[in-house]
Image (cartoon, rainbow, N blue to C red):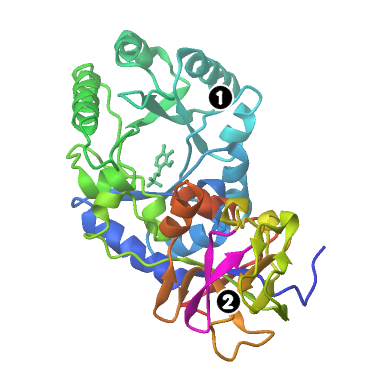
Amino acid sequence: MMTNSPRPTVAEIDLAALRHNLAQVTRFCRSGQRILAVVKADAYGHGAVHVSQALAAAGVEQFGVALLEEALELRQAGISHPILVFGGCYPGQEEQFLQHQLMPAVSDRQSLFRLDRFARQAGHAMKVHLKLDTGMGRAGFLPDEFLQLLPELSHLQGLRFVGLMSHLACADEMQDEVTPGQLEKFSALLREVRSQGLVIPDIHIGNSAGLVGWDCPECTLVRPGIMLYGGMPGEKYRESLDLEPVMHLRTRIALLKRVPPGTGVSYGHRFHARRETLVAVLPIGYADGYNRLLTNRGQVLVGGQRAPVIGTVCMDWIMIDVTDIPQVDVGDPVTLLGAMGDQLISAEEWAEWVGSISYEVFCRIGQRVPRRYLEGQGG
Ligand SMILES: Cc1ncc(COP(=O)(O)O)c(C=O)c1O
């Protein structure tokens, strides 16, 4: 149900910060390398359509999503750029891939031959990216399997091999001994492809951490996700990157109450006031993505200061202790994620509170929270 006067909980998406982060990505690209922006999972919760439109206007040439449904959402919004679907094409989806000119990443023989048959019968070639498992241990042809397949590729007349890709497993880690091996395997397989006379225009392996920390001279594309949204691709890059948060999760104080010492707060009374306490009630809860693990642990920004979450996070509410913050009032703005003035609650800090990663913090901000697109920080 849409309403013109929703509750004040909103995720502000700063498109100027998105463009700033895109410029940082560009700084790490070799000359001639182009960007395939990863906008899966609703652009990591930021809103895939608005984010893709902004990135396309800023010069991004291709997009990557996980699912057909995500690609169709972009097409329906008028985005006509090449879209790579990392999750591939499931049986029954072939027609839509062809109709909307979507490119599946293909990781296994059976899918490859199925897509070839379908495309030949339909009389339209399908563009595909071949995915190699050089050490991720997830999707992709294993090197031996791929070498066996290689001589057969030229017989698959229904397919156009427009990309050769792999994915890095450990590029974000402090002591990364895995990535050099993955890059080497990828290079060796690419040499085999070329020695068979097969021309594949787009070569790509780098996610954000791969792009920032490693070099792939053969790569024509990079595939950044988290960096575009202002998330650090790894602890070791914290000092070297100038990224701005794109998402700012905000609400306003709904109620204030002064309670005597000993008062229990929220389900299970997991918090008891030790002193006379000014409790602010905020209209946001775990149904909005405010993780229940933030119970007695999270912090928010209000009146230029930090205030702790007290008691259990409810489905639609949380309570914070504002006793030490001067002149708080009902309706005062509160920032739960992102910046307020010169203060910041980063996705990394939030992630540490709940034992996760910034990616999950962003992705979990619920559909119930409206996204508001701004140029610059609201607040
Ligand atoms: C295949 C693939 N490429 C690129 C990315 C982007 O990674 P990151 O957000 O770390 O830049 C992802 C994200 O998980 C991915 O699955």
Q: From the image, tell me which residue sits under label 2.
A: 334
Query: Residue at point 47% right, 49% down?
Result: 359
5 horizontally vs 164: left or right: right
**Which is in the foreground here, disc 1 or disc 2?**
2
284 horizontally vs 108: left or right: right
Q: Position of residue 115 (x, y in %)?
A: 53, 21
Residue 133's disc is: none
Query: Residue at point 21% right, 59% down?
Result: 240
Q: From the image, tell me which residue sits under label 1.
A: 123
Q: Position of residue 236 (x, y in %)?
A: 24, 50
Question: In the rendered image of this protein, does residue 117 appear above or below residue 358?
Answer: above
Magenta-colored span: 296-310
Three-letter amino acid code of the residue under disc 2 = Val
Q: Position of residue 195 (x, y in %)?
A: 18, 18
Q: Nearer the viewer, residue 291 or 27?
A: 291
Query: Residue at point 67% right, 55% down?
Result: 286
Q: Report whether residue 67 is seen.
A: yes
Image quadrant in which the N terminus is located: bottom right
Question: In the rendered image of this protein, does residue 357 appear above or below residue 155?
Answer: below
Query: On the rendering, which quadrant does ligand 1 occupy?
Result: top left
Q: Residue furthest bottom?
A: 327
**How far apart are labels 1 and 2 at the CA level?**
57 Å
Question: In the rendered image of this protein, does residue 64 appear above or below residue 316?
Answer: above
